[in-house]
Amino acid sequence: MHPETAPQLCVIEGDGIGHEVIPAAITVLQRVAPDVTLHHRQAGWEHFQTHGTSLPTETVQMAQQCGAVLFGAASSPAYPVEGYFSPIVRLRRTLQAYANLRPATHLPVPTSREGVDMLVVRENTEDLYIGHEHTEDEGQVGIAEKVITRTATERVTRLTYELAVRSNRKKVTIVHKANVLPQSDGLFRRVALEVAGYYPEITTDELYVDTAAYWMVKEPTRFDIILTPNLYGDILSDMAAAWGGGLGLAPSLSLGDNIAIAEPVHGSAPDIAGQGIANPTAAIMSTAMLLEHYWQRPEAAQRITNAVRKTLAEGDHTVDIYTQGAISTAKFTARVCDNLH
Ligand code: XYM
């Protein structure tokens, strides 16, 4: 988006394996784009525990100033904590990075399904993720607000179709639950179909989210682009990642106007954190998405993608793919760097 200015990147490792996969991704990025200036900032559960905030103001300011962000993962607790909120959910919303692109494409590993090439576009700023929750009746009733707006649906749909045209994709499937939620998902459906009408060259169809889940398991190759609200997108993109070969391989990019947040789809993986065995591929491929879609450097992005493919095709892999012959995060990253041409 700013191809003429020197690229600045706000780097937020976050929690858990974020401290391992983000440095790995930076190592690869610096090989193909040595002019990128890095600005390391803090966020996450660990930062909340030491400093009382999960997302310092100065992290948000630096992210805004850079325009490009590389985020690792957050370990948000599954119970309410006074003063805590998910830093990544908040960052996406604050920066209005409104479309989260989550591709799942076949890779040369035994866990990946041949012929899969889909892209989940997840609305990224509203739905149940606005986090308006409260309890009633002495904690025995929990209530969360789901918000869908015309504005947010229009912009994510327009971006989806523009991307479909640019990347030569053929079909967009709008996924919702408008039969049960005609006021909220019904609005998403109506507005998305309305915008779709301006793109007759792209085929548009729709599925209820439960049916979409069924077909994604049964016949994943029938999907091209899936456009869906925030929560369904979160869930379906993890499902899609399984066909891509696993969460360790699934990248994402949250795009807004002049803003992009690259982040692996996976979480902080506390069970393997600190062991040096996490798969850096998702983080590495996320930086490739940043190069392609934000910094307008498709050749640099392709160099990374090719190097990752070659590394996997040669049989090098981390423990999440399969245990036999697995190598460390550092070794895998070194192999990717060796394969950059
Ligand atoms: O722990 O985008 O704050 O997959 O779940 C974000 C993570 S919240 C956290 C996702 C997601």
Image (cartoon, helix red, strand yellow):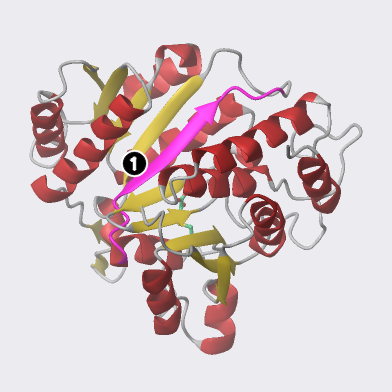
Characterize the local packing of mark 1: few (<14), some (14-19) or many (20 or more) Cα atoms within 10 angstroms. many
State which quarter of the image contains the C terminus: top right
Residue 338 visible in the picture: yes
Left or right? Give the position of 151 relative to 56: left
Residue with the most extreme right position = 325
Determine whether 227 is above or below 284 in the image: above
Q: Position of residue 179 (x, y in %)?
A: 15, 27
Q: Nearer the viewer, residue 83 or 254?
A: 254
What's the residue at 67%, 43% (across, down)? 281
Left or right? Give the position of 176 relative to 321: left
Determine whether 226 is above or below 64 in the image: above
Residue 140 visible in the picture: no
User: What span is colored magenta in the figure?
Assistant: 95-108
What's the residue at 46%, 82% (across, down)? 53
Residue 67 highlighted magenta (yes or no): no
> Which corner quadrant of the image does residue 84 belong to?
bottom left
- Give, as a three-letter code, the residue at label 1: Arg
Left or right? Give the position of 297 relative to 271: left
What's the residue at 41%, 50% (across, down)? 294
Mark 1 lies within 8 Å of ligand 1 (Cβ measured): yes
Q: Position of residue 311 (x, y in %)?
A: 78, 33
Q: Which residue is mark 1?
A: 122
Q: Position of residue 38 (x, y in %)?
A: 58, 70
Q: Position of residue 219 (x, y in %)?
A: 47, 11
Determine whether 275 is above or below 325 in the image: below
Residue 99 highlighted magenta (yes or no): yes
Q: Secondary structure at mark 1?
A: strand
